[in-house]
């Protein structure tokens, strides 16, 4: 009988399911890292929320672990690359607590607008300070959303109901989806200058870390209210405290903090701050949703091999697995290639299947390709949520199949149309491994490497030498080098597998080479 460790507080709904499905379980919450390391080897699965930290040391000790299941959305407490390298499936429940968390953000907004916690404390002390607590009306005020995904979308819907004007900064929000959500898509600078209330709804990524930096906070309107129910680290807490103290920012509602559990924090002690201990998802309804989903998903996986809501693995049935596996991996890789090559709102994604692959069930491959395309924008997307997310964002997804494939036994082509144009990428499977065989209509044949450099240039003598010199001087070792071109002296591409990801300064040097049109660092 498989064994599961419930390592964070989960609704009892999960326990009932494990019992009914015949999955053995232990409940050990609040374990310290060394305690977790000591016991994790006994388990096939682990069910967590945001409390348990599954870093690379814990995962290294998980000798029998097959599945990590997060009862919630964010998986920043799990080292997914380490889990993937160990062959451990990581699952989450992408929608189960979205409404609850959006409601918490709205609650924070009201609490700040009417200073409810401070007024409550004062009133219960018998002070009756009627003149001290002058609030602001939310009606007709501008709400600026940073991140307009599931939770941002629900907040927008509720704020529209309050007759607020909603503007959103989300580089990956398509104009069509913005219209559908009833928001005005704006640049960050515009949002900072216009918003009376700013709420954050992005994951914490390299791009979003400190998105409200000291510099950006200084560009906000005097009297702005700031709500963070997404992730600690999106806002510079020290800079925010200074602006609260000098009166520029009128209030801050924070559910998440740079360091959690937050026992001390720069924001604590200000009567303009409303703080909650990461309660965004803490309602009976949301906890029951996510506990039920996690227990079903883990039981299915451990008992039948079915994979649902996986962040690092395709969702395919046990029977389909052997045939589909290499093509699903190919789809994810070409999608990831394509997703890293676009900077604008995506209008449509077409996946074409040619040759033998067209005879298979292509749905998991299409989902894998979409997850690959969208992952650079939505860190926590998975194969199950990707089609729904694409649909929600107004991205038109199409599939086509053709029995003939002129060169390869099987070919898969991902074509992305954005506001600015069309880009297509094709690949195949050779010897069970995915290969990229067409970029910008140019043929080449390259294996995917963890770190790659893409350069589009005019095919002129001296380019390869100059590129090699820049990489050598930067200490970047070349592992593989593949070229494609339209014709001599015409459009050409180089796909270089590198042992170290090139720094932005190195990319800038390459970009500045004569005849280079575009240079990008890619990771797979
Ligand atoms: N406080 C809580 O208890 C709680 C509960 C649930 C979720 N969350 C967190 O809320 C966040 C949002 O969750 P979600 O379900 O809406 O996720 P989502 O993936 O549906 O949406 C995230 C949005 O952020 C956008 N985004 C990505 N990079 C961006 C950037 N650089 N600038 C602006 N926008 C960017 C994406 O395009 C996407 O639309 C996550 O971090 C999640 O972990 C917190
Ligand atoms: O990402 C999430 O789902 C939230 O941060 C909720 O976290 P929790 O389940 O630990 O409350």
Image (cartoon, rainbow, N blue to C red):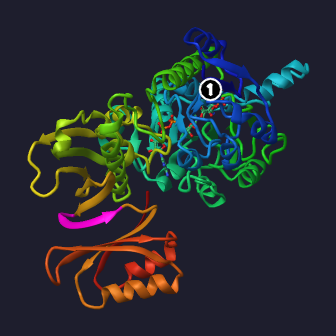
Picture quarter with the N terminus:
top right
Total numbered labels placed on residues in the image:
1
Question: Horizontal and vertical percent for residue 349?
Answer: 25, 45
Q: Which residues are magenta?
A: 440-447
**Which residue reaches farthest bottom?**
462
**Residue 198's spot in the image, x, y percent?**
57, 42
Q: Quadrant of residue 389?
A: top left
Question: At x 49% / y 35%, what residue is drawn?
Answer: 152
Q: Position of residue 282 (x, y in %)?
A: 66, 23
Q: Is residue 445 magenta?
A: yes
Q: Residue at x 45, y 39 (%)?
A: 313
Residue 1 part of the magenta segment: no
Residue nearer the viewer, 238 or 376: 376
Q: Tell whether 227 sits left or right of 184.
A: right
Q: Vertical placement of 5 versus 143: above or below?
A: above
Task: Give 190 or 70, whichever is nearer the viewer.
Answer: 70
Quadrant where the C terminus sits is: bottom left
Q: Quadrant of residue 47?
A: top right
Q: Position of residue 169 (x, y in %)?
A: 46, 47
Majority secondary structure of magenta residues = strand
- The residue where tag 1 is placed is 281
Residue 435: name its quadrant: bottom left
User: Can residue 320 be spotted in the picture?
Assistant: yes
Residue at the spot x=91%, y=19% of the render? 126
Few, some or many C-alpha atoms within 10 Å of disc 1 (few <14, some 14-19, many ≥20)? many
Asked if one can make out residue 393 in the rendered structure from this viewpoint, the answer is no
In the displayed structure image, the side of residue 309 where residue 131 appears, left or right: right
Disc 1 residue lies near ligand 2 with CB under 8 A: yes
- SS type, badge 1: loop
């Amino acid at each position: 009988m498989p064994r599961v460790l419930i390592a964070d507080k989960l609704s009892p709904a999960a326990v009932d399911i494990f019992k009914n499905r015949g999955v053995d379980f232990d409940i050990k919450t609040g374990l310290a890292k060394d305690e977790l390391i000591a016991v994790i080897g006994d388990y096939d699965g682990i069910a967590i929320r945001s409390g348990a930290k599954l870093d690379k040391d814990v995962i290294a000790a998980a000798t029998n672990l097959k599945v990590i299941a997060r009862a919630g959305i964010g998986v920043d407490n799990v080292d997914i690359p380490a889990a993937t390298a160990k062959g451990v499936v990581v699952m989450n429940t992408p929608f189960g607590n979205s409404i609850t968390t959006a409601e918490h953000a709205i609650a924070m907004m009201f609490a700040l607008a009417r200073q409810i916690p401070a007024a409550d404390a004062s009133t219960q002390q018998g002070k009756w300070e009627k003149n001290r607590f002058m609030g602001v009306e939310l009606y007709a005020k501008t709400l600026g959303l940073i991140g307009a995904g599931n939770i941002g979308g629900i907040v927008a819907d509720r704020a529209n109901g309050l007759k607020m004007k909603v503007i959103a900064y989300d580089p990956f929000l398509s104009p069509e989806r913005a219209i559908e959500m009833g928001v005005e898509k704006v640049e960050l600078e515009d949002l900072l200058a216009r918003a009376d209330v700013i709420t954050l709804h992005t994951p914490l990524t390299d791009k979003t870390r400190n998105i409200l930096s000291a510099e950006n906070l200084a560009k906000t309107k005097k009297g702005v209210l700031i709500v963070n129910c997404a992730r600690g680290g999106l806002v510079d807490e020290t800079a925010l405290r200074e602006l609260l103290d000098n009166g520029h920012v009128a209030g801050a509602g924070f559910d998440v903090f740079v360091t959690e559990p937050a026992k001390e924090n720069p924001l604590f002690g200000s009567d303009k701050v409303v703080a909650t201990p990461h309660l965004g998802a803490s309602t009976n309804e949301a906890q029951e949703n996510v506990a039920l989903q996690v227990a079903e998903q883990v039981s299915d996986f451990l008992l039948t091999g079915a994979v649902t809501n996986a962040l690092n693995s395709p969702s395919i049935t046990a029977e389909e697995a052997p045939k589909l596996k290499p093509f699903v991996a190919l789809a994810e890789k070409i999608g990831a290639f394509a997703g890293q090559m676009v900077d604008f709102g995506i209008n449509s994604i077409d996946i074409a299947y040619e040759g033998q692959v067209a005879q298979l069930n292509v749905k998991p491959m299409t989902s894998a390709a979409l997850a690959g395309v969208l992952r650079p924008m939505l860190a926590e997307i998975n194969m199950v949520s990707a089609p729904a997310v694409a649909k929600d964002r107004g991205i038109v997804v199409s599939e086509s199949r053709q029995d003939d494939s002129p060169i390869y036994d099987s070919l898969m082509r991902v074509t992305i149309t954005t506001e600015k144009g069309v880009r297509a990428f094709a690949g195949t499977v050779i010897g069970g491994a995915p290969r990229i065989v067409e970029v910008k209509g140019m043929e080449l044949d390259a294996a995917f490497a963890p770190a790659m450099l893409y350069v589009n240039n005019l095919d002129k003598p001296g380019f390869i030498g100059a590129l090699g010199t820049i990489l050598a001087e930067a200490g970047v070792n070349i592992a593989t080098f593949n070229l494609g071109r339209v014709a001599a002296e015409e459009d050409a591409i180089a796909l270089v597998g590198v042992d170290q990801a090139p720094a932005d300064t190195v990319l800038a040097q390459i970009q500045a080479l004569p005849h280079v049109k575009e240079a990008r660092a890619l990771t797979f």
